[in-house]
Image (tube, coloured by chain):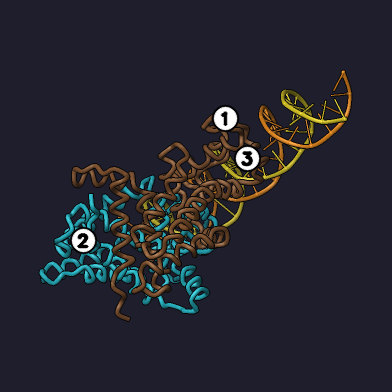
Chain colours: A cyan, B brown, C orange, D yellow
Amino acid sequence: MAQAGTVGRILDSAEVLFADKGFAETSLRAITSKAGVNLAAVNYHFGSKEALIQAVFERFLNLFCARLDGLLAELERKPGSVTVERLLATLSQSAAAVQRGDPQRVAIFFRLSGLAYSQAQGHLRLFFREHYGEVFRRFLRQLAVAVPDVPPMEVFWRVHFALGATIFALSGMDSLRAICRSDFGVTLSAQQVNDRLLSFLAGGIRAALPAS
Amino acid sequence: MAQAGTVGRILDSAEVLFADKGFAETSLRAITSKAGVNLAAVNYHFGSKEALIQAVFERFLNLFCARLDGLLAELERKPGSVTVERLLATLSQSAAAVQRGDPQRVAIFFRLSGLAYSQAQGHLRLFFREHYGEVFRRFLRQLAVAVPDVPPMEVFWRVHFALGATIFALSGMDSLRAICRSDFGVTLSAQQVNDRLLSFLAGGIRAALPAS
DNA sequence: ATACGTTTCAAACGTTTGTTTCGGGGGGCT
DNA sequence: AGCCCCCCGAAACAAACGTTTGAAACGTAT
């Protein structure tokens, strides 16, 4: 992590600090001193703090979406066998693609997503839709095929519900596991939490439609 | 909203601005000028900005938990008929208790919850557990009864997954409804979104257990 | 009317923030 | 060599922030 150039070191430090404290609560001085670079380097290489935040996201999302796009393309070549579980597992695999050696980066990725999702008032939501909306719609399309009993619009809503459950659960997984240990005396691995989450999501996506 | 005393006006303005821009991005000057009070009033009445944030939450959570506690007590008096759907509806009703005349306050409540959950890494979770853990465990106990096939620890995890889905879906409901309108040409009411969410959650909570 | 505790007000405080400036190298090119 | 372009570094910048201050205004009980 310390070998890369100035730009890489800034990104590495920024993503950790952002995930830890939030965007506004992390100063450029904290980032640059952790990265061991000059304060002015951020504005020189990225232009502004906002642009740095966006760059951090881009590095994650490019990895995630590239992997997801490839896996979806594979699945499209063998239709008929796409199930909800397999599609959800595809998302898991894609998320794992962001770790780049450090397994903790998956957690960082989800925490950043949670931050962005709740701050969505501003530029990040538009940015996401503009740059990665295509992959997202591709996923939505395949999922609609996997659950033919659920109308596309219902699938849309359920995917967003699932997104919320995922981001929320995984961004706070550490504290949840601690509570689970103290309340039930059981320590779950990240993989076990992931399995439970996927079961929950699959059940929700396949649930009976509301009365209305 | 402008009739109440200084303390009330500060709280009213603060919750709107916080929900709109986040905690760090909202200055005390913005709050006090919107409330029409002096800047120093916040530190005089609340002590600090952080204490103000906490006070905003307490006002919401007291309403929510009081209502939830009452409804759960009612349900406990007629056991045997408690279903997942009824328990989830109980939560909906409790959330509606925070609106205090203004229906928009429910959305504010959820947006604040989303912000707090993603911003404070577990700290708010601890605060919540300390102050309102009793009500929460009461709910958990009843839910475990309603789904006897799901072990209590699994219920614990699923409730937190459900919490995430709820907070994130409802805190961004406005933009989601806009996307739904543009993608499907359908405008859903808040009630319709709520019904869909509850179906999803019930399906997730009752889902088949993971293989493990 | 006087005295008292509470609340409000304008002003200033000290810090921290993101950003900018300017000077100095280092390596490749003509 | 000289020139150019890219990168780094220390310092300074103005603005915004949360917080504090001390005095004025208030209602109320003596």
Q: Which residue is denoted by mark 1 in the rendering?
A: B36
Which residue lies at the image location 59% right of the left edge and 46% below the top edge?
B52
- Neighbourhood count class around disc 3 (C-alpha, 10 Å): few under 14, some 14–19, many 20 upward: many
Q: CA distance from mark 1 to mark 2?
A: 49 Å
The location of residue B183, given as percent across then percent down, is 20, 47
Q: Chain of mark 2?
A: A
Residue B39 visible here? yes
Which residue lies at the image location 24% right of the left edge and 42% below the top edge?
B187
Q: Dots 1 and 3: beta carbons under 8 Å?
A: no
- Secondary element under disc 1, as helix, strand or loop, is loop
Mark nearer the viewer, 1 or 2: 1
Q: Chain of mark 1?
A: B
Q: Which quarter shows the N terminus of chain A?
A: bottom left
Q: CA distance from mark 2 to mark 3?
A: 48 Å
Horizontal side, residue C10 vs residue A93: left or right: right
Q: Which residue is denoted by mark 3 in the rendering?
A: B42
The location of residue B51, given as percent across then percent down, is 61, 49
Q: Which residue is denoted by mark 2 in the rendering?
A: A139
- Secondary element under disc 3, as helix, strand or loop, is helix
Check disc 1 and give the amino acid type: Gly
Which of marks 3 and 1 precedes in the sequence? 1
Check disc 2 and give the amino acid type: Phe
Which residue lies at the image location 20% right of the left edge and 69% below the top edge?
A71
Residue B20 visible here? no
- Secondary element under disc 2, as helix, strand or loop, is helix
Q: CA distance from mark 1 to mark 3?
A: 12 Å
Check disc 3 and give the amino acid type: Val
| Along the line of sight, the residue nearer the viewer: A23 or C13 | A23
Specify the farthest residue to the bottom: B212
